[in-house]
Image: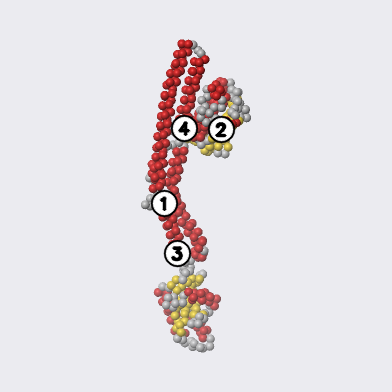
Amino acid sequence: MFDRLTIRIFTIFLLTIAFFLMLIIILPSLDSRNLTYLSNQQKQVGNILASQLEKELTNVPKNSFRWWMRFIVVMDSHQKSSQYLFILTPNEQIITADTKNVDLVKNFSEKSHNIKDPAKKIYGSQEIIGPFLVNYAKEEYKLYVLQPASDIQSQFVSLIFDHPFLLLALTMLISSPFLLWLSWSIARPARGLKRAADQVAKGNLQEWPDLEKVGSTEYKATGASFNHMLRELKRMQESQQRLFSDISHELRTPLTRLQLAASLLRRKQGESTEVTRINNEALKLDAMIGDLLSLARHQYDNNEIRDLYSVNILFKQVLDNATFEAEQIGKDFVILHPPTNYTILCYPTALCSALENVIRNAFRYSNHKIEVDFVAQQKHLTITIDDDGLGVPDSELEQIFRPFYRTSEARDRESGGTGLGLAIVSNAIMRDHGTVKAEKSPLGGLRIVIVLPIQNKK
C-alpha cells in the first residue's frame, strides 16, 4: 500500500505535521528557566537550613523593637557566599538584606507557594528555590533562597525559546536536508522518465526497463506505458521503412521497364520528341523516388550516431568539393568567413548532406556568384548561403521547405528538381536542434540561413 505515490505524499505530510506539533509541545518544556520541582536531596538541604533558622529565631521576641532586624542578622549568619535569604511573613511581607531582588522573590512566591512541594526557577544567572517552612511565634513563615544558577543555558538557546518564530525557522532549517532528500527520492523516477523522453526526442527509441522497476506504483505503470509506446513507435517505424522499401522496389521495376521500352522504341523508330519526353519524365520520377526514400531515411533511420564534431573539420570536404565544382562550371564561389574550431552536436553525414544540398541548389539557380559565411554568435553558429539568381517571391519563402512544394514548375523541370531537397535539409537541421529559413539575398537571389547550437569552444 505504501508503494502508491498518493499514500507516500500523504504519509510524509502527516508525519511532518506531527513532527512540528511534537516540537511545539515538547520544546518549551525543555527550557531550563521553567519552574521545576526540587529533588528529595535539594528539599532536604533547604529544610535543614530552615530548621537552623527556626532554632535561632526562637530567641527573638515577636513584638520586640525592630525584631525583623534580628531576623536579618540570623539569616546573614547562615547564608553562604553569593547567596541571599528571604523570609515571607504570613501577611506577605518580605524580610531580607537584599532589597534589590525583592520583586523577583515576589514573582516566584506567586508561582511556588506550597511548602510541601518546593520548586526552583532561573532568572538570568540566578535561581530562586523554596519555599521552606519556618515556624515562628506559632505562625508559618516561608523561606526562599536566591543563589547563582547551577544550570545556566546559553543566551542563544534562551533567545530561541523567547522567540517562537525563530524556533520554527531553525526547526525548518534543520529539517530541510531530510525533506530535500525525501523530495529528491520521490522525484527520482520522474527525472528518469525525463531522461528517457529526451533520448526519444533525439530519435533513440530503445526501451528503458528501469522505468518499470523504480518508484511508486504510479511511476512504474507510467514507465510500462512509456516502454509500450516505444515498442509501438519502433514497430511503426520499421513498418514505414519496409513500406518505403517496398514502394521503391515496386515503382522502380516498372520504371526500368519503361526506360527499356523507350530505348527499344528509339532504336526502332529513331529519336523523336515524344520518346525523349518519356525518357526524361521516367528519369525525373526515378530521382523523385530516390529523394523521397532519402527523406524517409533521415526521418526514421537511427543508425547514425549523434556526436560532437569540430565545425572546420566537419564541413571541410563539403567546402572543398564546392570549390572544385565552382571552378568546373565557371562560377564564383566565395567563403567570406571560414568555419573555425567551434564544436556542435550533430549527425555528421546528414548535416553535411544538408549543407551540400543547399550549396548545390545555389549553384543550380545562381547566375555567377555564390557566397557562404560562417559566423559564431554567443551559443549559436549561423551559416548563410547566398546566390545571385532570380530568388523566390516573399510570399513563398516559408513554403519552400515543404515536401513537393515548387515555386516554378518550369524552373524545376529544367533543373531536374523534385521538390524534396529543401525538405530533406529542414529535417536534417531540426534533428540537430537547429533552424533553417529562407530570406532575400543581398546578391539579389535567395539566402538560406542555418542556425546550429554550439556546445563549447575548444
Q: State the residue position of label 2.
A: 398
Mark 2, Cα crowd under 10 Å, few <14 / some 14-19 / many 20+, is few
* Whether label 3 touches label 2, CB < 8 Å: no
* Whether label 3 touches label 1, CB < 8 Å: no
Whether residue 265 is situated above or below residue 4 in the rendered picture: above
Q: Nearer the viewer, mark 3 or mark 2?
A: 2
Report the disc number at residue 6: 1
Q: Residue at x 52, y 38 (%)?
A: 455
Q: Nearer the viewer, mark 1 or mark 4?
A: 1
Give the structural element (helix, strand or loop) at label 2. Answer: loop
Q: Nearer the viewer, mark 4 or mark 2?
A: 2
Q: CA distance from mark 3 to mark 1?
A: 29 Å
Mark 4, Cα crowd under 10 Å, few <14 / some 14-19 / many 20+, is some
Give the structural element (helix, strand or loop) at label 4. Answer: helix
Q: Point out the tag, 1 or 4, that comes first from the N-terminus.
A: 1
Q: Residue at x 40, y 48 (%)?
A: 216
342 and 25: which one is in front?
A: 25
Q: State the residue position of label 3.
A: 25
Q: Nearer the viewer, mark 3 or mark 1?
A: 1
The three-letter code of the residue at mark 4 reads Gln
Residue 212 in view here: yes
Whether residue 37 is situated above or below residue 218 in the rendered picture: below
